[in-house]
Amino acid sequence: MLQLQTIRENRDFVIERLKVKNFNAASLVDEIIALDNKRRSTQKELDDILAQSNIIAKEIGILFKQGKLDDANTAKEESGKLKASAKALEPVLNETIETLNNRLVELPNLPHSSVPHGKSAEDNEIIHEEGVFPALSPEALPHWELASKYQIIDFELGNKVTGAGFPFYRGQGARLQRALINFFLDQAIESGYLEYQPPLLVNSASGYGTGQLPDKEGQMYFAPEDNLYLIPTAEVPITNIYRDVILKEAELPVQNVAYSNCFRREAGSYGKDVRGLNRLHQFDKVEIVQIQHPDRSYQSLEEMKNHVASLLRKLELPFRILRLCGGDMSFTSALTYDFEVYSAAQKMWLEVSSVSNFEDFQANRMKLRFKDKEGKTRLAHTLNGSALALPRIVAALLENNQTDQGIKIPEALLPYTRFNYIG
């Protein structure tokens, strides 16, 4: 959530920056400023009435002690009128605050100055590409056919037991999943991240804190009887550890990593790009999260970007990094890098990671703060990234490494799989 002070003091700048996200903010920004003006004037009026009421209350006691009953009773009547006025103002103030907060959460985060203009993924900027595309035979199979051939992923069984988008992993497929999860966790721990195993359901306050609610409510699975949401990513519970927390500057950066199942409804996803593992409703992901000092958050973003790149190099996958344009960015992000791996049998790029800096947007929602060296309380910056999401990594590994002997396992995973080939 943008800070009110930022909106009030930089109206035109906020409106212009949000145009990069193709968001016309002018009327909403003006409504927010008007509501804040009303909140301030109502609060001042209420404070003045309460202050006057307190003064009269003290005078009443003195008048009674002095035996000035008529004056005391007159003062009591005046006090009663003031209390009635205050009581009438309280719901007006509360309603104004509620409406103001509801409007504030409708404003997206401001994009960083480096974010390119654009309307869709076609306008994203490729900033890095590396790796060699594998030369596959004409008989090369896409991963869903390889999964069936080697009996390592069962999409039909998942459809029977749950529905489309919930596959079963079996045998070497299950072991490959477990190997990737442990590999990603170990790499993060070696880089200084503290491992957590978070709950898979969160309350609405947590969804609100990281910005999934109300923006992405339709994409989240919801248990109405308990008023709980299945997490779309471990970002939500891990970042919310620090909701309503004041850290010390010396504790920054906080670096956490977590593996979790992730759940996304992905309503309206159809076509060839969602076949097999390309888009699932339940999937595994290792997430890295940082809480950082505002002066160092973009340095941390580069470090997180380099961490994800190192994982893909060790998996021997060709990949590219994109700086997302304004039209393809999330509601909450200030700057996002996407990582895509090349899937040779499908002849297409598959997104496997997003690494983002949210600056103080999430922190303002969560009241996540730190005390600096001068003792001043400030909002922290939050960052997160997939390191990595498994389904499309598995798809690319299966397709790119298919040989006559079976599917070759990258050297970095051999200590985890303890087999060289699938097949």
Image: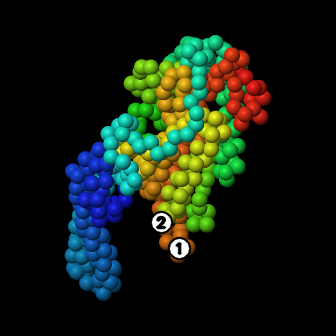
Q: Nearer the viewer, residue 31 or 80?
A: 31
Give how far across and how far down residue 205 sits, in percent. 47, 46
Which amino acid, mark 1? Answer: Gly
Q: Can the viewer see residue 372?
A: yes
The residue located at (50%, 24%) in the rendering is 347
Q: Nearer the viewer, residue 57 or 390?
A: 390
Count the labels in the image.
Answer: 2
Q: Nearer the viewer, residue 356 or 210?
A: 356
Image height of 120 relative to 69, above or below: above
Quarter placement of the C terminus: top right
Residue 10 placement, left or right of 384: left
Give how far across and how far down residue 217 sits, in percent. 41, 36
The residue located at (21%, 76%) in the rendering is 74
Where disc 2 sits, the SS reads strand
Give how far across and how far down residue 16 sits, in percent. 27, 54
Mark 2–mark 1 CB contact (< 8 Å): no
Considering every residue shown, the one lying at the far bottom of the view is 66
Image height of 350 relative to 4, above or below: above
Query: Could you say which quadrant of the image residue 420 lies in?
Result: top right
The residue located at (53%, 75%) in the rendering is 374
Where disc 1 sits, the SS reads loop
Which amino acid, mark 2? Answer: Arg
Q: Tell me, what colour scheme is on the image?
A: rainbow
Q: Nearer the viewer, residue 17 or 397?
A: 397
Q: CA distance from mark 2 to mark 1?
A: 9 Å
Image height of 202 relative to 45, above or below: above
Q: Which residue is mark 1?
A: 375
Q: Can the viewer see residue 226?
A: no
Query: Could you say which quadrant of the image residue 326 lies in?
Result: top left
The residue located at (66%, 29%) in the rendering is 177
Q: Which residue is mark 2?
A: 378
